[in-house]
Amino acid sequence: MEFENNALFWQKVDAIFMSGDYKTIYKKGTVHPHYRDLVFPADYGHVMSEKGNDEEPELKVFKGNKGYSAQAIVICANILEKTVSSLVLIGLSEEEIQDVLHFLNGNEFQKTVIIRKGRSIPSWATAE
C-alpha cells in the first residue's frame, strides 16, 4: 500500500480549521499577483497560529461553500522556492477540486499530489 489513510488524522485537521481563525486572502476569481495568467479557482486563505504570525499560517486552505470539513490535502513541490508545502481542501465541489489541481500545476516549477480523506483507522493509529 502506498498510502494508508487515518480517520483520526482527518479529525485533527477538521479541529484545527474549526477552532482556528480562518482568513480569506484571495477570493475566487482573483488574478494571482505574480502569475497574471492564473486565476484563483476557489477562495484561498489560511488559519493563523495563536502567535498571530501572518508569515507562518498553521493551515493553508482552498475553501468552497459546501461545508467545513476537510476533503483532501494537496502537497506541492516548488523548485523555484525550494519548498514542499501542503494545502487543505475544504467545502469544494469535485469540479472545484479539479480546478484547484489545474491551478496548482499550472506551471513547470510546481507540481502536486492529492491525498483524499478516508474513513479507515489503521491499527497503528490508536493510542494504547
Image (cartoon, rainbow, N blue to C red):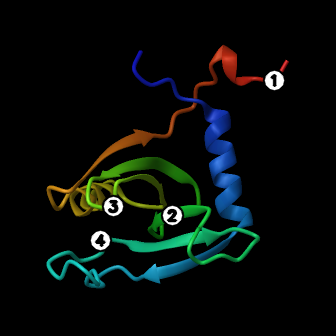
- Look at the picture and state if 14 lies above or below 125: below
Q: Residue at 63% across / 50% down in the picture?
A: 13
Q: Give the CA distance from mark 3 to mark 2.
A: 17 Å
Q: Give the CA distance from mark 2 to mark 1.
A: 28 Å
Q: Which mark is residue 81?
A: 3
Q: Which mark is residue 25?
A: none
Earlier in the chain: of badge 4 and badge 3, it is: 4
The secondary structure type at the circle numbered 3 is loop
Earlier in the chain: of badge 1 and badge 3, it is: 3
- Image coordinates of residue 5 in percent, x first then y, are 53, 28
Quarter of the figure with the C terminus: top right
Cβ–Cβ under 8 Å for marks 4 and 1: no
- Image coordinates of residue 69 in percent, x first then y, are 58, 55
- Residue behind mark 2: 60
- Along the line of sight, the residue nearer the viewer: 50 or 6: 50
Q: Which mark is residue 41?
A: 4
Earlier in the chain: of badge 2 and badge 1, it is: 2
Looking at the rendered structure, the kind of residue marked 1 is: Ala
Q: Give the CA distance from mark 4 to mark 3.
A: 22 Å
- Image coordinates of residue 22 in percent, x first then y, are 61, 74
Q: Residue at 50% across / 40% down in the picture?
A: 117
- Residue behind mark 1: 127
The secondary structure type at the circle numbered 1 is loop
- Look at the picture and state if 61 lies above or below 4: below
- Along the line of sight, the residue nearer the viewer: 89 or 34: 34
